[in-house]
Every structure is written in structure tokens, then in C-alpha cells.
Image (tube, grey):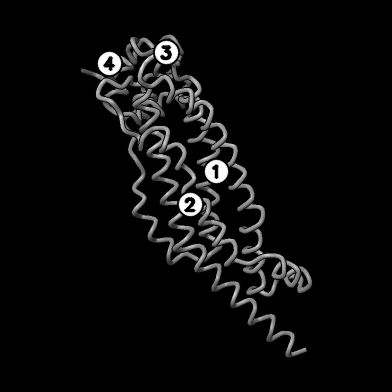
Amino acid sequence: MDLNQKKISDLVGENYLYASVLHYFGIQFYDYSELTLHQVCEAKGIRMEALISGLESAVEVDESEEVALVGYPIELVIEYLKHAHYLFIKRRLPYITTLVADLSEEPGFYSSIVKDLKFVFPLFVEDFIHHIHEEEDSLFRYVSLLKKVTSNHYNPSQVYYEMEKYSIQQHAINHDVHDDEMKGIRNITNDYQLQTNAPLHIRVVYAELESFEKSLVTHARIEDEIFFPKALMLEREVKILLQQKVRSN
């Protein structure tokens, strides 16, 4: 059967990623579950070819390519991490937030889980966004300043002040505390375990939460195994340069 003649519920049931594609076209799959793709496009005034193209290209990113970051200079690693932050905050989290907010609270096995998710997930998002802004405004800014020192573009007094104020090692220790940010979500969902008769909406929510957690694990590994070692080496290099400058004066 052609995609345009399939029911929305059937499409999403075949591939949960289709739900996110529909979302970015302004279609919440649970609001149009019994309509065909063709009917929804007509109702919403969406060009069928564009939507089908989006659905057909819905594949998960192969994060194994990220090992190439090992050879990147630290300023490019920072840009990569900031871009990942942008995607988390502007695309993935708003989508999952909508999915969770629109979950039905009808009586049944998932009733208490839905209530807990609706309470806990917004708190998780708020804390997560705060953590990202804090990381970018302090840690990334500090490392970027250290990089300027190696290029001889810096204000000595500012660098001395910042190095007294910050420590890459301390940031790395604090980062470990945030490494398991979704523990509470896992506890609520019993590690994303589903009953065989779980509603499609719940299945999509669990799939997106689990996928997001996998992305966070990859992101944390890049920071722990690539960013922080590079940042520590840079900080040591800058300390040596400043010591040499003091001795030469």
C-alpha cells in the first residue's frame, strides 16, 4: 500500500520515528490516527510530496562517526557540543514535552505513570536546560578564553582572574554528577518496559525517551573522553605559558 493511503496510526506503528516527522509538519499523530496520510495532507494543506520525502528519510543518526572528534581541535569540539545542545533544546525536548503533555490520563495500567511523567518531565527539562546554559556560559567560555592565550590574543589580568576562579578538573567532577540525568524517568517507566497491549501514544513516548537518553549517554561520553581531556591539556599548556611569561618579565 502507498504511504499516502495508510492510516496515521499504522504509519507510526510501523516506525515511531514517523511521529516526529509528522510533528514537525504540524501533525500530532494521536489527533489524526484514523485518517490516511492523504486525508491529513488535504485537511492541513500540506504538500504530500514534501511530507512523504520527510517520512522516507526518517533514519536515526549514526553516532559512531563521532569518533572523528578525537582529532578535532578543541574549539571545533565545543561547536559540535553547542550544536548538540541546540538540537536538544530547540527540537527534541519540545517534541517530547508535547508528547508527554498530551498523554491521556484515562484509568488503566499507565494512569499513574502518565501522571508521574507529566509532573516529573517538565522539571527534568527545566533542570537540563539550566545545566546546558550554565555549561556554555561558564565552562565553554573559559576554555575558549584559554584557547585565545595559545594564540597570543588575550588580556593577562583577565586570564589570571579566570584561572583563579575556574578549574577544568572541578568541572569534570561536577559533570559526573549530571551524567545520569534521566534516572528518575527510567524509574517511572520501569526502564521503558512496555506491556504487550500498550497504547501507541505510550509506545512513542517511551521510544523517544529511550532514544533521548541514548543521545545523552553519547553526548556525555564525548564530553568525558574527548572534551575534558583536551581542555585539561589546554589548561596545563596555558599555565606553562603564563609561568614562562612571568619569568621573562
Picture residue at 46% right of the left edge, 48% below the top = 180
Q: Earlier in the sequence, mark 3 or mark 2?
A: 3
Please report whichever mark, 2 or 4, sits nearer to the chain's N-terminal start.
Answer: 4
- Kindly indicate whether the residue at mark 4 contacts the one at mark 2 (C-beta within 8 angstroms): no
* In-image side of 155 versus 4 (left or right): right
Amino acid type shown at disc 1: Tyr
In this rendering, the label closer to the viewer, 1 or 2: 2
Kindly identify the residue that appears in the image at 55 percent across and 39 percent down: 89
Circle nearer the N terminus (4, 3): 4
Q: Are marks 3 and 2 in contact (CB under 8 Å)?
A: no
Where, by quadrant of the figure, is residue 170 drawn? Answer: bottom right
Which quadrant of the rendered structure holds the C terminus? bottom right
- Mark 4 surroundings: few (<14), some (14-19) or many (≥20) residues within 10 A: some
Q: Which mark is residue 106?
A: 3
In the rendering, which numbered label is found on residue 179? 2
- Counting from the top left corner in percent of width and height, residue 67 is at 38, 60
Residue type pointed to by label 4: Lys
Q: Residue at x 42, y 42 (%)?
A: 213
Where is mark 1, residue-wise?
86
Quadrant containing the N terminus in the rendered view? top left
Name the residue nearer the viewer: 232 or 113.
Answer: 113
* Of the two numbered discs 1 and 3 in the rendering, the one whose residue sits closer to the viewer: 3
Alpha-carbon span between mark 4 and mark 3: 27 Å
Task: Residue under label 4, please give it.
Answer: 6
Q: Amino acid at mark 2?
A: Asp
Report helix, strand or loop for mark 1. helix
Q: CA distance from mark 1 to mark 4?
A: 33 Å
Q: Is residue 153 above or below residue 172?
A: below
Measure how far apart labels 1 and 3 are at the Cα level: 34 Å
> Which comes before the other along the chain, label 1 or label 4?
4
The image shows residue 127 at horizontal and vertical percentages of 59, 41
Please report whichever mark, 1 or 2, sits nearer to the chain's N-terminal start: 1
